[in-house]
Image (spheres, coloured by chain):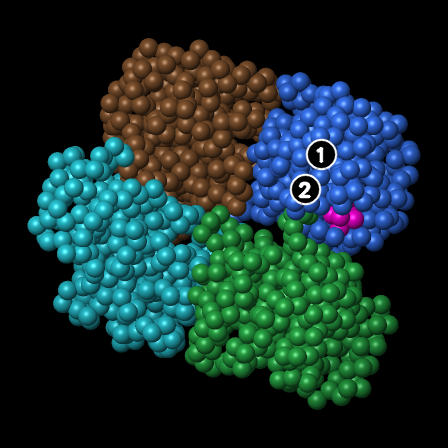
Chain colours: A blue, B green, C cyan, D brown
């Protein structure tokens, strides 16, 4: 259920409606928009008597929502969600494209700084690096853990880059929340609902990767889990889906970008590194992702990919990243967007 | 790396080899077989000097394993793993087929007992029921939690059924481990490695469902995660994979049963309920699963499926379950197996 | 549109209705059933005035069909189609299962006879062999053409086996129609509509393989193309669909068997050879196919598979075929069916 | 097998090598390049004695090719194939992008001319329109046949557009070859090898669409069928593959563009209309296709899509096509390419 407030509704009126919803035993989600505020209601099973709410001061209308997703939907909030990072001019979801770059895993302080310096120089505003790695094999390198988080915190201080790193479980989530600027939920955990709920209780933006076999509806419902806990800053990420095709590791589904944008106000970025699994296709698919209208890119860069402890085959060289930034920036112009 | 002991090796010799491996900083996994014991070594990165181990008393040979999976592999243990339940004649993986039946979710004490009575009467030895439900929507019924576990414990006492229920996160795992006989890991969590590791630290059998887009190798590697922590009682479960086909909810991949059996000593059961998503196909695919050589079935049964809070469309009626047991039992005979 | 005649309608009344439909410029398809005759109408675009037809003598009712398939549907003909072969006791679609066996390609007279003798001895009633091979590479063995057809005609005479062979184009179709008992349309040609129409103009049964990415609806519509030309003897064949799974060449979708049987009166057989691509899985999946309720099997058998010019890896040895027949026969009994 | 001639080899030397190959009973395929000529040999089964050929005058080296494709490969011809249309400045495969636009089906002379006028005005150089339609249902509109071909011939005369239309069988191929400038082979016929061979015997360029479940290797091998008959002007076309995703009709696999370009010298264009099945995604995916590096686009345009007899839902309006041309042209500049 969705309460749409009048354009001229006051903060006090909004507050009264929220309290009324809470008294009924449900949860209000006020979503301010440019024109007016909408209030999503979760926790109900359709049994709310909407008549009472409609009579409250400042309420324009009450809408029963039949789609399974509510808070992610443009029905609740028509304007694009723009995620800002106080103290910086970085943002995700607005006119400026966000570029997140860095190595798959933080391997050493030297490696991390070497890559960070180069991606910062090329114009990236966000640095990615794995501290906790979800590896197919229990015997593969699993990440440096908190040590990696500390290295990334130093990188933020030195290069002004915002930090994005994955939380693979609720324990890692606490530490990631302490150190990072954006909490990443990986594709393999897209339907780990306990982790989604836990991330929803944090107050840092969450980058949610699409599961390798997730439908658009399942993808949006995973975001809904996070938002239903009160964290409205979710960044969706297309990273390739599993198909019969063998020429890439996954098949990057760029059509999901306009499909998401029709249904949801959340920003969506594209990961051409995991989406192809091959270095020689990353730049071409990065260009395509910007051209299709994505709000940003997340790209694996390594200064010595042949020595990388993970994902070396899909990491590009720093000089390729510079080329990527140049080409992506030009294409962004065609869409009246900007690569800062 | 794999150490194969001589047939006549003594327990003391095995112990010495294990201690030697530990001193090297690795982890030994002794796997007794009918003919001889093999000791898997995990934690190494290929740098062990195998010469020293080969010289220890009782060692027949040391094998470098190139496949990514070790402990799940028939290379380590050729004989089929048979999981037994002390105090009962139930088993999984041997000549007797295991049938696990019950409702998707435990909804009420009355519902659970009504179904349990009927599946026990029809010959099932295991009772399934969801206490914690991984639902696509945060607003759907999420299960009764510990209350459901207590109901199932009563059912075990009354009907002698072994209890199988899903742990959706590490918190639920503790409670499930307290109450259940088999810990289920669902398809959406097949690559939730933290949960797999935590389940590997328990000493109850784990039923691991195949992810909806998991390759055979990924499936076996997920089992390897559990085993690498020392829990060797893993039951694999095929439950359908995601394809373009629309006539069923998932496409049940029965060929994975003989494929698993060639590579691994672990038992594998089939879930025709999730594998088709349609009541009218459950019996036919149950027959096929037994015919292809599965070690058992896990089937959703509900006495009032039209009123079920989850998965009603794929739950069969108790009288259909009786027919299923009859037909499955006859087909088992053809394979020289038995439905108790 | 579908005209359902009264149970007591006379042949003359049926004839009058058919002529009336033809005068309207459409095509009548009388389908006699055990209880009554239905007459499918094709060629109309929904503009028929059904009132006139309903007033004709012997007409029970006129039904507008909304499903895209008509003639394949149980709406038109509720009873199972049973295809009989005059002069033999072989049939497809009834209580008796049909087993079609033989080599992928006819390579030499000696090879063909060697395999035929053994499959006949094991109880097969149908012999398959490729004369025209649709090969992925233009440089691979393409079949012996008419010479192979002549060899198969000799095999029919000597062993009493009915001959099944593929027509890869309209030219080959003419020759296949001259020599064979069943015209096979391969998976790659399932949507070669010109070939389907041409096969529909023949008066021999057509075995239609499911395309490797065909939905159930597309599969049935391909059969509809054949039937719309007046050839009502179509045998459907599941042979595996393309998925991400790598442990088999294709993923055999056994759930399509009960799905077809709900919607259509046409018989459906299963090809475990192409459906798995691996010899070591053919027997297990053959058992499963019979258990799921298929009307028969089509299996590749070769006396020297390692020397086969095509598909050797998935061809079973004659002694394996004997085992398959034994096990399939026992499972058929459980379904109250029979392997002759 | 592949014969690489010396850079300074004369036409006479090339001729002698070809004749030598023919005398051996094989087929030579001379492929002139900017630097030197290579001669592909087909028809051999690896039994050629390469020594003799290497001794012929002008031969640089003889290479055994292990890949299944030969003539499509950059091993045979490293330079991009550019297909030119005499008497026009249109080309496919060079610096200039090719845009093919028009309605799904030619419905009437008025409809065809209305669309043609607008796409010509917007800058398209090629006009597409279906005369023979491969429809899933035998009862759906099947195209106007030769009448449509005549209309398109008039359109060529009036607007200077080159004509692209599909040949669904060998009969249609003869007529299409008479009237059209490019022969289209549809996705459903990608493995209709008889049709591929027949198209290979024509001397007009062939636009070959990727099958909906074709791997890259199968796609290239289908082109090899055409080239092995001597027609070297093949244009590949990505048009979406079948996956579990439901938000588009097919999943457009843009990564196949750089994958093809690494392996093959043939041009590749993208069909965003069939690749998405949704009008509202055509422009976004067209931009992405140009950005990924495709050599052109094939787009469905209709002046009254709501009244189209086929594919209305994915046809864009003429004014949308103008916008598409504008945006695609700007993106082409970023890749140093040009939209004429």
Position of B148 with respect to C219 (left or right) is right
Residue D251 falls left or right of residue B161? left
Q: B93 or C153, which is in the foreground?
A: B93
Q: Residue at position x 75%, y 64% from top?
A: B146
Dominant SS in magenta: helix
Pointer 2 local density, CA inside 10 Å: few below 14, some 14–19, many at least 20: some
Rendering quarter of residue B18: bottom right
Task: Kindly identify which chain the residue marked by label 2 belongs to.
Answer: A
| Secondary structure under the numbered disc 1 in the rendered image | helix
Q: Residue furthest left?
A: C12
- At 69% from the left and 79% from the top, the residue drawn is B157
Any magenta on residue A197?
Answer: yes
**Where is residue B160 drawn, in percent x and y?**
64, 80
Residue under label 1: A53
Q: Is residue B154 visible?
A: yes
Magenta part of the protein: which range? A195-200
Helix or strand or loop: what does disc 2 sit on? loop
Give the residue number, with chain letter if any, for mark 2. Answer: A48
Decide: is D326 above or below B179.
above
Which comes before the other along the chain, label 2 or label 1?
Answer: 2
Q: Quadrant of residue B167?
A: bottom right
User: Are discs 2 and 1 less than 8 Å apart at CB?
Assistant: yes
Residue A284 position, x and y percent, is 62, 31
State whether residue C118 appears in this view: no
Calculate the distance from the C-alpha at mark 2 to the C-alpha at mark 1: 9 Å
The crowding category of the residue bearing disc 1, from other C-alpha atoms within 10 Å (few below 14, some 14 to 19, many at least 20), is some
Q: Is residue C149 magenta-colored?
A: no
Query: Is D340 situated left or right of A43 in this image?
Result: left
As displayed, is residue D41 above or below residue C283? above
């Amino acid at each position: 259920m969705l309460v749409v407030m009048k354009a001229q509704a006051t903060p006090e009126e909004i507050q009264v409606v929220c309290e009324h919803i809470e008294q009924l035993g449900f949860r209000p989600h006020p979503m301010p928009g440019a024109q007016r505020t909408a209030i999503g209601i979760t926790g109900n099973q359709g049994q709310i008597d909407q008549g009472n709410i409609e009579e409250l001061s400042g309420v324009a209308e009450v809408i029963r929502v039949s789609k399974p997703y509510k808070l992610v939907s443009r029905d609740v909030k028509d304007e694009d969600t723009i995620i800002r990072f106080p103290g910086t001019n970085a943002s995700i979801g607005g006119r400026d494209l966000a570029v997140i770059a860095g190595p798959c895993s933080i391997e050493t302080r030297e490696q991390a700084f070497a890559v960070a310096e180069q991606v910062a120089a090329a114009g990236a505003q966000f640095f990615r690096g794995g501290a906790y790695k979800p590896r197919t094999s229990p015997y593969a390198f699993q990440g440096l853990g908190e040590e990696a988080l500390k290295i990334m915190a130093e990188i933020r201080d030195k290069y002004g880059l915002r930090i994005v790193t994955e939380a693979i479980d609720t324990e890692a989530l606490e530490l990631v929340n302490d150190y990072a600027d954006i909490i990443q939920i990986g594709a393999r955990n897209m339907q780990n609902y306990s982790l989604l709920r836990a991330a929803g209780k944090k107050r840092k933006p969450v980058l949610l990767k699409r599961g390798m076999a997730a439908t658009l509806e399942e993808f949006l419902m995973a975001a809904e889990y996070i938002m239903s806990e009160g964290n409205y800053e979710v960044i969706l990420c297309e990273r390739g889906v599993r198909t019969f095709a063998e020429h890439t590791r996954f098949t990057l589904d760029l059509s999901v970008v306009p499909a998401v944008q029709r249904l949801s106000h959340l920003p969506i970025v594209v990961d051409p590194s995991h989406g192809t699994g091959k270095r020689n296709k990353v730049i071409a698919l990065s260009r395509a992702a910007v051209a299709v209208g994505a709000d940003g890119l997340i790209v694996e860069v390594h200064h010595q990919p042949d020595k990388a402890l993970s994902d070396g085959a899909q990491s590009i060289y720093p000089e390729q990243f510079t080329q990527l930034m140049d080409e992506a920036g030009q294409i962004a112009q065609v869409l009246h967007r900007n690569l800062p």
